């Protein structure tokens, strides 16, 4: 079993839709949870991070962590064509700095 | 700020050749990492370093070597290149062990 599981998609939605992206994980030691956005042929860029459980909101983006279920989510409201990218979840225990990534979900927002 | 700089951006190697992928950061970060990204496979950690002179293996270290003689530089060495090493390589750095990673723009390597 992989430490972090993420549905690779692809996911295609119309502009303005609410997008839900999810990851599950198996390592209960994970404390830091991140979402990265990666445009084609570019490096990943940090979108959101959350420490431990709870919600965090930043503009149209909301990150949720449920440690009891080992489940994290990223919601994108009022999605835009510029949101079309691959979204990678990532997490670590905070002890060594080793970041474990999910496979990434490819999102396309159609105008 | 330049952030994390990787060179070269593209490279084609023949089987059995060697090369060094360069990575430099100007943020005075202690932690540095090398990842490879294969299509549809996410990023896998090759090697990482928690400071100058200290390196350790990640998930997929075979066929690679690293060194960390300064805080700024973290080169990745490929010895005896194989087709399985065809991938996109990303270097990253962070100031903490928990979050805040900054990635370079990647090196796209093809071994033929």
Image (tube, rainbow, N blue to C red):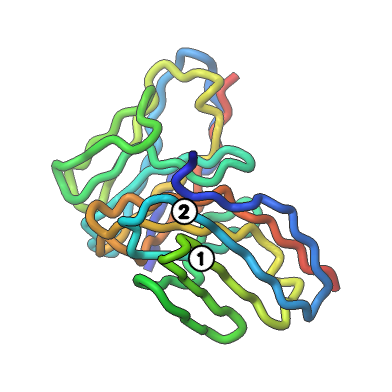
On what subunit does the disc labeled 1 rest? A
- Marks 2, 1 in one chain: yes
Where residue B29 sits: x, y (%)?
25, 60
Foreground of the two, A9 or B36? A9
> Does A82 appear above or below A96?
below
**Secondary structure of residue under mark 1:** strand
Q: Is residue B8 something that shows in the picture?
A: no
Q: Position of residue A37 (x, y in %)?
A: 57, 63
A35 vs B47, left or right, is: right
| Callout 2 touching callout 1 (CB < 8 Å) | yes
Name the residue located 47 percent from the left edge and 63 percent from the top edge: A69
Query: At which x and y percent is residue B31?
Result: 25, 54
Q: Residues within 10 Å of mark 1 (few under 14, many from 20)?
A: many
Furthest residue toward top: B16
Residue at 35% across, 72% down: A51
Residue B104: numbered disc: none
> Mark 2 — residue?
A25
Residue A72 is marked as 1
At 46% from the left edge and 13% from the top edge, which residue is drawn? Answer: B16
Q: Is residue A47 left or right of residue B76?
A: right
Label 2 and label 1: CA atoms lie apart by 8 Å
> Image check: B39 left or right of A68?
right
Horizontal side of B79 relative to A85 (left or right) equals left
The residue at 45%/54% (across/down) is: B104
Query: Between residues B69 and A100, which one lies in front from this camera angle?
Result: A100
Q: At numbered mark 2, what does the secondary structure look like: helix, strand or loop?
A: strand
Chain to which the residue tagged by mark 2 belongs: A
Q: Nearer the viewer, residue A107 or B83?
A: A107
């Amino acid at each position: 079993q992989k430490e972090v599981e993420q549905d690779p998609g692809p996911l295609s939605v119309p502009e303005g839709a609410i997008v839900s992206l999810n990851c599950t994980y198996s390592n209960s030691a994970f404390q830091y949870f991140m979402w990265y956005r990666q445009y084609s042929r570019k490096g990943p860029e940090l979108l959101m991070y959350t420490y431990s459980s709870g919600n965090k909101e930043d503009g149209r983006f909301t990150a949720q962590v449920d440690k009891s279920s080992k489940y994290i989510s990223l919601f994108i409201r009022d999605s835009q064509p510029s949101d079309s990218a691959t979204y990678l979840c990532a997490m670590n225990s905070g002890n060594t700095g080793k970041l474990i990534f999910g496979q990434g979900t490819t999102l396309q927002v159609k105008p | 700020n330049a952030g994390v700089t990787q060179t070269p951006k593209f490279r084609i190697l023949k089987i059995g050749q060697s090369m060094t992928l360069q990575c430099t950061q100007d943020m005075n970060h202690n932690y540095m990492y090398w990842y490879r990204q294969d299509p549809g496979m996410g990023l896998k950690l090759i090697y990482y370093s928690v400071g100058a002179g200290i390196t350790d293996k990640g998930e997929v270290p075979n066929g690679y070597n690293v060194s960390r003689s300064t805080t700024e530089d973290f080169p990745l060495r490929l010895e005896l290149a194989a087709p399985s090493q065809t991938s996109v390589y990303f270097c990253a750095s962070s100031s903490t062990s928990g979050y805040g990673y900054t990635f370079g723009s990647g090196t796209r390597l093809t071994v033929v």
